[in-house]
Image (cartoon, rainbow, N blue to C red):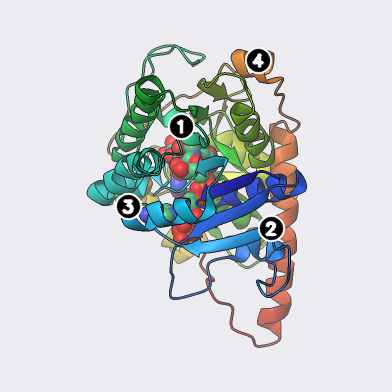
């Protein structure tokens, strides 16, 4: 039985990866942060009572900014594979918290690699580093492959650039089996609510139910190569099963604007969406949506552009070339974009139907944001 350690177990990818590895017979350890509220929703279905025998899923409190903690967890668990998925992963937020992002996303990776070296596990433990298409940033060439030059455009991407290269360096300097998966955007019903796709599918479901009138978004013209997280965690695992450690791009090869993602999502609930505020000055955008003159009929949907969601420097176009992964890893995505949108929309419609019953019954719902 192989043992895996997953940092970021409470996140979207951590949850899907844990499920995948448990299904393959792994013993899975996860690193979770202390929070003042329960933060394990995404993995609660995998929970095993620690008092029972043969427990294959265990969580440990930890943080990527705490090296002694990481050394102790790695020493205790002696993993065959570490998947470093933990990160402050929100690009826009990284402009507000650049130092913390550098610490967790950049130095956090170094702490894991050093812990392996300090513990004498360089021969035993393989490492997957969650690298990102954000490394490409300002477009140098398309489609983007393993050989396309990087030009990061946010504190998040710059921190991930350090993580990328320190992973390569430890592989070359110490012969470690350490690999980067350069993953393009991947989404799912478990996607964090503040990333654009989930923000859109939640709003589409809520607007269809009359729970919300307007969806505020930033740059509608940005283009992303969106895949399904379930397909992408499969690729992470395959990367660590190779004979030689290498870096791989994981992408669908199809790019779509935020605007079209909006249209596709609302079409799932039979709503033709209107886009307001374009061509109006910055304050005008928001004012139009808040103006009572513009009452929206229930069942109709409106998107308003709110410049507060613009980023100081934007990544305009991502489209990945995953030829190497397809040939070497034998990886193929099972979901295309319409299937992804359908999966997310169905889940959010179900979620808000449940919430409607609870609200109608006079119950308060925690974490209930529009
Ligand atoms: P999420 O934001 O959903 O999850 C991030 C995880 O990291 C959460 O479990 C979070 O814990 C944890 N975390 C954050 N900071 C720390 C810290 N200082 N110490 C320990 N844990 C921490 O991200 P995803 O699952 O979407 O992404 C997984 C990884 O892949 C990230 O590194 C991301 O940057 C990268 N990536 C993601 C892509 C995507 O499209 N999803 C594409 C390419 C790369 P908590 O729940 O407590 O907040
Ligand atoms: P991204 O994802 O920055 O690509 O990073 P996000 O969904 O946040 O943004 C995608 C694009 O949509 C535009 N956008 C908005 N974004 C958000 N969050 N909220 C809005 O209201 C909004 N309106 C328009 C953005 O400007 C951007 O162009 C994700 C994260 O998962 C990273 O961790 C990961 O590395 C990359 O994907 C690949």
Residue position for label 2: 56
Residue position for label 3: 67
Q: Residue furthest front?
A: 120
Residue position for label 1: 132
Q: Is mark 1 within 8 Å of ligand 2?
A: yes
Q: How crowded is the residue under tag 1: few (<14 C-alpha within 10 Å), some, or many (20+)?
A: many
Q: In front: mark 3 or mark 1?
A: 3
Real-space Cα distance between discs 2 and 3? 25 Å
Circles 3 and 1: CB distance less than 8 Å? no
Q: In front: mark 2 or mark 4?
A: 2
Q: Is mark 3 within 8 Å of ligand 1?
A: no
From the viewer's perspective, is residue 85 above or below residue 321?
below
Secondary structure under the numbered disc 4 in the rendered image? helix
Q: Which disc is residue 141 wearing?
A: none
Circles 1 and 4: CB distance less than 8 Å? no
Q: Which disc is residue 328 wearing?
A: 4
**Tag 1 or tag 3, which sits nearer the N-term?**
3
Residue 94 screen position, x and y as percent: 32, 46
Q: Is residue 137 visible?
A: no
Of 213 and 352, which appears nearest the observer? 352
Residue at 71% of width from left, 64% of height from top?
45
Q: Quadrant of the N terminus?
A: top right
Real-space Cα distance between discs 1 and 4? 19 Å
Secondary structure under the numbered disc 1 in the rendered image? strand
Q: In front: mark 1 or mark 4?
A: 4
Real-space Cα distance between discs 2 and 1? 29 Å
Circles 2 and 4: CB distance less than 8 Å? no
Residue 234 screen position, x and y as percent: 68, 35
């Amino acid at each position: 039985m192989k043992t895996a350690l997953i940092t970021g177990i409470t996140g979207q990818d951590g949850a899907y990866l844990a499920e995948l590895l448990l299904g393959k017979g792994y013993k899975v350890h996860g690193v979770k942060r202390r929070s003042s509220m329960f933060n394990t929703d995404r993995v609660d279905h995998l929970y095993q009572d620690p008092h029972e025998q043969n427990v294959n899923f265990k969580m440990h409190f930890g943080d990527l900014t705490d090296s002694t903690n990481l050394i102790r967890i790695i020493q205790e668990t002696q993993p065959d594979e570490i998947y470093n998925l933990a990160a402050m992963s929100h690009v826009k937020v990284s402009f507000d918290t650049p130092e913390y992002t550098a610490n967790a996303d950049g130095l956090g990776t170094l702490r894991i690699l050093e812990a392996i070296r300090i513990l004498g596990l360089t021969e035993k433990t393989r490492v997957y580093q969650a690298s990102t298409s954000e490394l490409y940033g300002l477009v140098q060439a398309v489609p983007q492959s393993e050989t396309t030059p990087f030009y990061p455009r946010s504190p998040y991407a710059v921190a991930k650039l350090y993580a990328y290269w320190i992973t390569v360096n430890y592989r070359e300097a110490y012969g470690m089996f350490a690999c980067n998966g350069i993953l393009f955007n991947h989404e799912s019903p478990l996607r964090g609510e503040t990333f654009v796709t989930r923000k859109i599918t939640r709003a589409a479901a809520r607007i269809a139910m009359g729970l919300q009138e307007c969806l505020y978004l930033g740059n509608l013209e940005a283009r992303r190569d969106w895949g399904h997280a379930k397909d992408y965690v499969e690729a992470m695992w395959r990367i660590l099963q190779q004979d030689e450690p290498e870096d791989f791009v994981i992408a669908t090869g199809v790019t779509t604007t935020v605007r079209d993602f909006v249209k596709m999502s609302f079409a799932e609930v039979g709503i033709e969406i209107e886009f307001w505020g374009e061509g109006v000055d910055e304050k005008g955008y928001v004012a139009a949506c808040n103006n009572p003159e513009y009452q929206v009929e229930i069942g109709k949907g409106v998107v308003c552009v709110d410049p507060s969601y613009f980023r100081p420097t934007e990544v305009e176009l991502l489209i990945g070339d995953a030829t190497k992964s397809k040939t070497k890893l034998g990886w193929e995505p099972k979901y295309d974009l319409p299937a992804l949108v359908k999966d997310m929309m169905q889940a959010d419609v179900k979620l808000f139907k449940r919430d409607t019953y609870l609200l109608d019954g006079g119950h308060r719902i925690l974490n209930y944001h529009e």
